[in-house]
């Protein structure tokens, strides 16, 4: 007989994990979220720093999000009412490296306020979030699932179900030997890296765009981060490496990558920054998204959610966690 679902562990405090946790907790379940980093957000992330005593910030992960789905749009409206999200109206262009043309605005683009990780932090405030907790192993006992973390070893708490809201390659070592179904699914996904470069300047750049889609490696995206609502501090730009180029150069030094990306920025009208910071996203997107929405092994009582299961993007991640929570509640009933 399956254990009644009352206590749920969620590994990963990105948008998928937070959405799943919120729905389950609102339904009365006891939910604990484990996050390996210092706070919630996942790849909807913001870097904070200081240059010569001047604070700066830059959204170096997901740049913005759209809300075409009615459930997600209602959630974004809730974030707006809470003051943690707003509409970004950038001057958008596209280039092939030679010509530039205006990118038509067909959808609303939302961002977190005052930074992109604000909605995730807003969601995490009402949850039982354990940070700096890297889950390395799971063991099923008569009392339920027990988790081991790199920082604290085996934890005392037991759980009726475990949700893994993490990239597919990180799922593999946790479910191998526990769920053949989920292990095969995770192993079928090829995820790619992305280099992000955060540039700071002492004065605004006189470029005729705030966001630029680049159809020529090494860049895929250029944005004036300081043009987003609620931003303060110096002129800040972010560059994203093109997917295949980033994957090819994923083990290169940050200095070598930055040199190539800055040269490409100069080619679209930019200039050499006063300072920069490079960040390597090891699992940024997928060559082949599963498009299953989520995955649930009822026998093992293990679930998976994340953007890699639902078309990518922030909306896809949130919906993956949201719909998995609905599936668990139906099982519970």
Image (tube, rainbow, N blue to C red):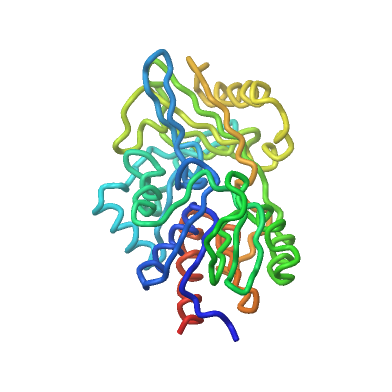
**In this picture, is 72 found above or below 192?**
below
Q: Taking 25 as reference, is 330 left or right? A: right
Q: Quadrant of residue 193?
A: top right
Observer-nearest of 320 and 30: 30
Q: Position of residue 69 (x, y in %)?
A: 41, 65
Q: Position of residue 262 (x, y in %)?
A: 58, 23
Residue at left offset 52%, top offset 22%: 276
* The C terminus - image quarter: bottom left
Q: Position of residue 203 (x, y in %)?
A: 37, 17
**In this picture, is 52 found above or below 297?**
above
**In this picture, is 75 found above or below 244?**
below
Residue at left offset 72%, top offset 29%: 252
Q: Quadrant of residue 78?
A: bottom left
* The N terminus - image quarter: bottom right
**In this picture, is 153 found above or below 187?**
above
Observer-nearest of 55 and 139: 139
Observer-nearest of 104 and 244: 244
Count of marks, rendered view: 0
Q: Position of residue 33 (x, y in %)?
A: 48, 56
Which residue is most to the left? 81
Residue at left offset 53%, top offset 54%: 12
Observer-nearest of 144 and 271: 144
Residue at left offset 41%, top offset 44%: 117
């Amino acid at each position: 007989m399956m254990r009644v679902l009352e206590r749920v562990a969620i590994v990963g405090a990105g948008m998928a994990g937070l959405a799943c946790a919120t729905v389950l907790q609102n339904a009365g379940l006891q939910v604990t979220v484990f996050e390996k980093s210092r706070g919630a957000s996942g790849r909807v992330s913001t870097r904070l720093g200081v240059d010569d005593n001047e604070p700066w910030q830059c959204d170096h992960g997901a740049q913005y999000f759209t809300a075409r789905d009615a459930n997600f749009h209602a959630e974004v409206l809730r974030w707006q009412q809470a003051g943690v999200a707003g509409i970004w109206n950038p001057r958008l262009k596209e280039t092939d490296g030679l010509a530039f043309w205006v990118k038509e605005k067909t959808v609303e683009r939302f961002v977190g306020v005052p930074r992109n990780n604000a909605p995730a932090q807003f969601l995490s405030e009402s949850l039982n979030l354990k940070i700096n907790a890297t889950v390395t192993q799971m063991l099923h006992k008569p009392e339920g699932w027990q988790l081991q973390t790199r920082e604290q070893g085996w934890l005392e708490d037991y759980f009726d179900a475990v949700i893994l809201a993490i990239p597919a390659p990180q799922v593999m070592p946790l479910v191998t030997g526990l769920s053949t179904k989920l292990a095969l699914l995770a192993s079928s996904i090829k995820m790619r890296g992305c280099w992000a470069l955060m540039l700071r300047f002492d004065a605004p750049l006189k470029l005729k765009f705030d966001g630029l889609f680049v159809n020529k490696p090494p860049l895929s995206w250029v944005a004036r981060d300081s043009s987003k609502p609620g931003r303060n501090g110096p002129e800040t730009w972010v560059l994203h490496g093109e997917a295949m180029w980033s994957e090819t150069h994923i083990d290169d030094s940050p200095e070598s990558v930055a040199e190539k990306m800055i040269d490409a920025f100069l080619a679209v009208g930019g200039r050499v920054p006063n300072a920069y910071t490079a960040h390597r996203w090891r699992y940024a997107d997928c060559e082949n998204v599963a498009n299953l929405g989520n995955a649930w092994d009822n026998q093992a009582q293990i679930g998976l959610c994340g953007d890699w299961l639902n078309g990518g993007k922030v909306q896809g991640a949130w919906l993956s966690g949201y719909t998995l929570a609905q599936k668990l509640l139906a099982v519970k009933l």
